[in-house]
Image: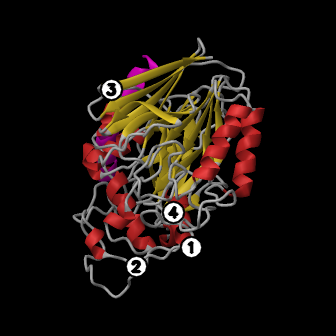
Amino acid sequence: MTRHFVIAILRVSIILTFFLTGHTAMANTPLLGMGAKSGEVTSTSANISLRLTKSLGQALNHSVPGQLGKARIHYSLSPNMQSAQLSSWQSSAAENDYYLQYKLTELQANTRYYYTAELANTEEKGSHMSAIFSFKTAPAQNQRENINFQVTTCQSAQGLPVYPVMQRQNPDFLVSAGDTVYYDKFDVRSKEEAFWLYQKEYGTPYTINYFANTSAYFMKDDHDYRYNDADPYSNVEINTKNYVWGPNGLNNNLDRSDKTWLTHEEGIEVFKQVFPSSDLPYRSFRWGKGIQIWLLEGRDYRSANKEPDSPQKSIWGKQQTAWLKQTLLSSDADFRIIVSPSPLIGPDKPHKRDNHANVNGFMIEGRSFMDWMIENNLVENTFLVCGDRHWQYHSIYKDKVHEFCSGPTSQFQVQYVPKPTAGVIKQPYNGPTGGFLTVKYDTEKTVSFEHYGETGKLLNKKTFSH
């Protein structure tokens, strides 16, 4: 039986297994109503994220009620879970919305692992097993293997059907490049309401089935941190006219007295609890000899957006910038891919000022970094990928630095598409469409960036050789 056939069987059966398990589970024993997620995968480790729930489906308000209980992970090289290893038990708590995270270590490189959760109630009177999930570890640093990964951003409920389309490509992993949810479109003013929105967007069969067998690296941006264009210092008053997608499912009173957003600290905390996460929000992962990816943090360390642009104004902060340059210079991967939640090249809408592509934003930092890339001869095999923008594009800075934007997951989220004026930016592709970006590395030392529409139609492709 081939690996892809086994994975296909798991994907088709995952929801059915949930419901069969629900009928046999003991009273008050928690379930995995939002499935499971693997992430932060290396060649020897992976993080697993679970949320213990009372139900398998969403309630009428799109919530998936949480449940107190305990869980541990069984993981194996066999889809039948033979000779499984065990993690330690962890107990869920209401304070973090019943999420649990586990780190699996000493794994084999370039190998598919299968895992299931053993679930028990707080009284520890017996337990039952969840459905079986899987993930693939990265190749060892000296291995050249074909790699296929995907990038998404600007997710909406209308874009969830793109996940089965993406699944058909059998990706090795996903990079979710920010704006996983939109707090400011659903009147989210508290941690509890933020957790509700993740239940709404990630408690669906679309996401449960995709992440059942595909690991992911999750990045945050403004909308899944606080609100549009938020920085650590801003405190814009809530305007309920912006909630065009409706009120949240916990409090539908738009005129309630509380007019404050999540704080800077709360925005960071919720995101780290919801998804598999590392100690630092900026990090780099190696996928064999062929690919190394950098995942940048764009909200935690930035200067105030309203400051005049200057060499001191920064999105990344000194520590992240020094780390980025040092790790780029020391990498011997065939291709280096820097993923930013917001664009460096763009262009962006003229009125914006919260990213590197904006004249009145952080353009000095962005262009200084790209000039540094050129000066250090990195541009032949180093590429930029970004989220945040609501259209797909391929832009080039000074004919040397290439940036690819994945665009939103749905046509529903497509916005005005600015084109570059005469100057240092060229744009071979500008697509007002929803979908996703696929990056494919071939052992012949080529890398391709492929834009796809919502139905899986190839819209643009650019290939580079090393």
Looking at the rendered structure, the kind of residue marked 2 is Glu
**Lower sequence index among marks 4 and 2:** 4
| Residue 311 at x, y percent in the picture | 68, 56
| Label 2 secondary element | loop
| Residue matched to label 2 | 237
Within 10 angstroms of label 3, few (less than 14), some, or many (20 or more) residues?
some
Seen from the viewer's position, the closer of residues 110 and 16 is 110
Is residue 134 found left or right of 255 in the rendered image? right
| Label 1 secondary element | loop
Looking at the rendered structure, the kind of residue marked 4 is Glu
For the residues labelled 1 and 4, say whether their Cβ atoms are less than 8 Å apart. Answer: no
Which image quadrant: the C terminus?
A: top right
Residue at 36% x, 49% y: name it.
Answer: 155
Within 10 angstroms of label 4, few (less than 14), some, or many (20 or more) residues?
few
Magenta span covers which residues? 1-23
For the residues labelled 2 and 1, say whether their Cβ atoms are less than 8 Å apart. Answer: no
| Residue matched to label 4 | 124
| Label 3 secondary element | strand
Question: Can see residue 87?
Answer: no
Give me the C-alpha separation between circle 3 and circle 4: 53 Å
Residue at 57% x, 51% y: name it.
Answer: 363
| Residue 394 at x, y percent in the picture | 44, 32
Give me the C-alpha separation between circle 2 and circle 3: 40 Å
Label ID, residue 233? 1
| Residue 371 at x, y percent in the picture | 67, 38
Outermost residue to the bottom? 257
**Lower sequence index among marks 2 and 3:** 2
Q: Nearer the viewer, mark 4 or mark 2?
A: 2
